[in-house]
Image (tube, grey):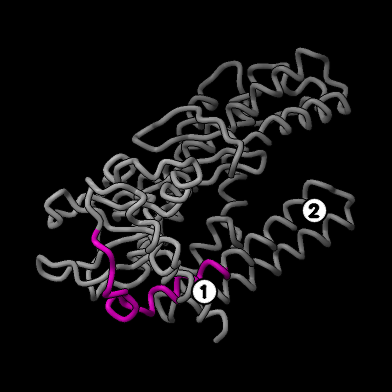
Amino acid sequence: MGGSLKLATIQGIPVLLHWTFGLLFVWLGYVGFAEGMNAIGILWFFAFALLLFACVVVHEFGHALTARKFGVDTKDIILSPLGGLARLTRLPEKPIHEFLIALAGPATNVGIAILLFPIIWFSSSMTFQITDTADVLFTKPANLMPLLFYTNITLVVFNMIPAFPMDGGRVLRSLLAMSMNRLLATRIAVVIGQVFGLMFLLLALYLGELILGLIGVFVFFMATAEWRSAKMDHALRSKSASEVMRTTFTRVRENQQLGELAAVFMTGIEVSFLVFEENGYVYSGVLNASDLAHAYQQGESQRLVGELVKKEIVYTFPEASLNDSFYKMIQHKVDLIPVISGQQIVGVIDSRIINQTLQGNSRN
């Protein structure tokens, strides 16, 4: 999701605009011109699109804030021409939680439609029956609220299609996972999603609708990506930290020079390090491999470890799944996480252990 512009941070969640979002207005302008709209009509068309995406943002916050109630954070919300995406830091633990998180998005669109209904019903200038042709449809402000009402209803129906990445796919998976393991539930939901993607594509070829075809391709490949993600999640959940942790590791002090680590770093066995305060006992953070490698490339071997340490006090436990370590490493942007038993560090989990576990699973 590179090339995104940060619009705002709401409830601690960044809202990003992907660079391709501008292509939407190019396409809307083309459609408006093809339908015979004048410049004012096209501008109103743009205004309606912005109102619609405001509803999309509310939809994604429905997911994000519900996820927060179940202890799942949201990395960010990204807006693109195909809609919005709330990127959760991890999958919810329980199927019922995924079910409620998935439903929360469409529920916000139902809520918006309910709020709009009395406004339109009691208005003297607005009506639910719209008879204007496309060339003048958006030039009448009285049409915007009814159009927004119908579009929110359409969003609910479309999002509840049982295909990834739509919410209906996640609802289906969560319901299946209540009576079977999540991996099998995902496989069934993914196959259904791929079938829908192919149906959209075939229908697009029959009708000559490019956008429908793009949606079909998008749905098919997103369903495939969901399967890969589910397999990775399953592999990491099947291992505990104690099974794969490395029990020998180098204790690095903040007052050491980076050059002192070069010999260990060059072996490739340890490329990220746990850092401790000058007494060597109080854990203070992680020295990431990328930061250390960059310092070496810049000829900064004389710098102190304490200048580069990422002071994130994050850890896991021997009985915790490897999945717990993986998501904590992503969330806190560290390559290494200590395993704590009692008051002692008994081992470490690093990105290489994660990769080896995933590679081993892919061969099985």
Looking at the picture, which amino acid does disc 1 mark?
Lys
Looking at the picture, which amino acid does disc 2 mark?
Gly
Seen at 59% across and 41% down, the residue is: 2
User: Mark 2 Cα within 10 Å, few/some/many (few <14, many 20+)?
Assistant: many
Q: Nearer the viewer, mark 1 or mark 2?
A: 1
**Residue 248 lies in magenta, yes or no?**
yes
Q: Is residue 59 visible?
A: no
Camera-side residue: 51 or 182?
A: 182
Q: Position of residue 228 (x, y in %)?
A: 57, 69
Camera-side residue: 31 or 262?
A: 262
Counting the numbered discs, the total is: 2
**Residue 356 lies in magenta, yes or no?**
no
Camera-side residue: 67 or 127?
A: 67
Is residue 89 placed above or below 79 in the rendered structure?
below
Is residue 304 placed above or below 34 in the rendered structure?
below
Tell me the number on the disc at residue 231.
1
Q: Which residues are magenta?
A: 227-251
State the SS at label 2. Answer: helix
Q: Quadrant of the C terminus?
A: bottom right
Q: Quadrant of the N terminus?
A: top right
Main secondary structure along the magenta-highlighted residues: helix
State the SS at label 1. Answer: helix
User: Mark 1 Cα within 10 Å, few/some/many (few <14, many 20+)?
Assistant: many
For mark 2, what is the residue?
Answer: 213
Position of 129 compared to 297: left or right? Answer: right
